[in-house]
Image: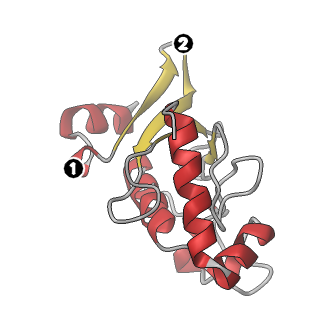
C-alpha cells in the first residue's frame, strides 16, 4: 500500500510506466503498463505486466509476467521476467549472481520496473530465459529487431 501511494503521488520518471493494484480488494495482484524504451525496437509499444506479491513481501520478491508475452532474451516464452533483482535473496546456488544483485527488501516496484525497462533496451545474453531468442539476437540482431517491431505493431492493433 505504501509503495502504491508513493507511485501515485510521485509518478513514474518520464511517465515510462504506471502500476497499481488490479482491484482494491486484493493488493497482492498488480498490473503495470510499460512504455517501450526510446531508440529500441520496443519504442512506441505499451506492454502489460502482471505483478504477483507473496504474503511475506517485501522479504521475498514479487513475480512479474508480461501478458501477452514479450519477445526478449530475458523473458521466458510464457511472459515471466528473468532478472537478477527479482531472484530470491541470498547466495545464488549457480554462483552466477552476486547476492547484492538479487532481491533485497529495500527494493521497490519502481526500481524493479525501471530495471526491466533497462533490460528491454539492453538484454543480458549471458543469462538468457528464452534461449531461441538469445540465439536469434546473437546471430541475427536485425531479424530479432524486425520481429520485436512486428510484435509491437500487432499488440497495438495497428495495420502494418
Q: Which residue is drawn at 62% across and 50% down?
A: 70
| Front-lying residue, 35 or 105 | 35
- Secondary structure, mark 2, is loop
The quarter of the picture where residue 2 lies is: top left
- Secondary structure, mark 1, is helix
Q: Farthest front residue? A: 160
Marks 1 and 2, the one that precedes in the sequence: 1
Q: Which mark is residue 58?
A: none
When the figure is inspected, residue 14 is found, relative to residue 92, above or below; the finding is above
Which residue is tagged 1? 14
Judged left or right of residue 93, residue 68 is left
Q: Farthest top residue? A: 25
Which residue is tagged 2? 25
| Front-lying residue, 3 or 22 | 22
The quarter of the picture where residue 85 lies is: bottom right
Number of residue marks: 2
Q: How crowded is mark 2: few (under 14 residues within 10 Å), some or many (20 or more)?
A: few
Q: Where is residue 26 drawn, in percent x and y?
A: 57, 19
Q: Quadrant of the N terminus?
A: top left
Q: Residue at x 42, y 66 (%)?
A: 118
Whether residue 91 is visible here, answered yes or no, is no
When the figure is inspected, residue 81 is found, relative to residue 31, above or below; the finding is below
Q: Farthest bottom residue? A: 95
Q: Residue at x 44, y 48 (%)?
A: 109
Amino acid at each position: 500500500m505504501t509503495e502504491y501511494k508513493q507511485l501515485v503521488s510521485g509518478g513514474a520518471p518520464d511517465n515510462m510506466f504506471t502500476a497499481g493494484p488490479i482491484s482494491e480488494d486484493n493488493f497482492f495482484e498488480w498490473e503495470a503498463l510499460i512504455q517501450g524504451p526510446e531508440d529500441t525496437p520496443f519504442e512506441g509499444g505499451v506492454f502489460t505486466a502482471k505483478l504477483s506479491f507473496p504474503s511475506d513481501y517485501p522479504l521475498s520478491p514479487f513475480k512479474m509476467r508480461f501478458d501477452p508475452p514479450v519477445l526478449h532474451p530475458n523473458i521466458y516464452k510464457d511472459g515471466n521476467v528473468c532478472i537478477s533483482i527479482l531472484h530470491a535473496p541470498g547466495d545464488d546456488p549457480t554462483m552466477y549472481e552476486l547476492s547484492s544483485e538479487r532481491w533485497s527488501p529495500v527494493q521497490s516496484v519502481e526500481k524493479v520496473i525501471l530495471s526491466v525497462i533497462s533490460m528491454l533496451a539492453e538484454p543480458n545474453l549471458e543469462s538468457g530465459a528464452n534461449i531461441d531468442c538469445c540465439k536469434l539476437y546473437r546471430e541475427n540482431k536485425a531479424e530479432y529487431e524486425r520481429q520485436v517491431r512486428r510484435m509491437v505493431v500487432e499488440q497495438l492493433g495497428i495495420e502494418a
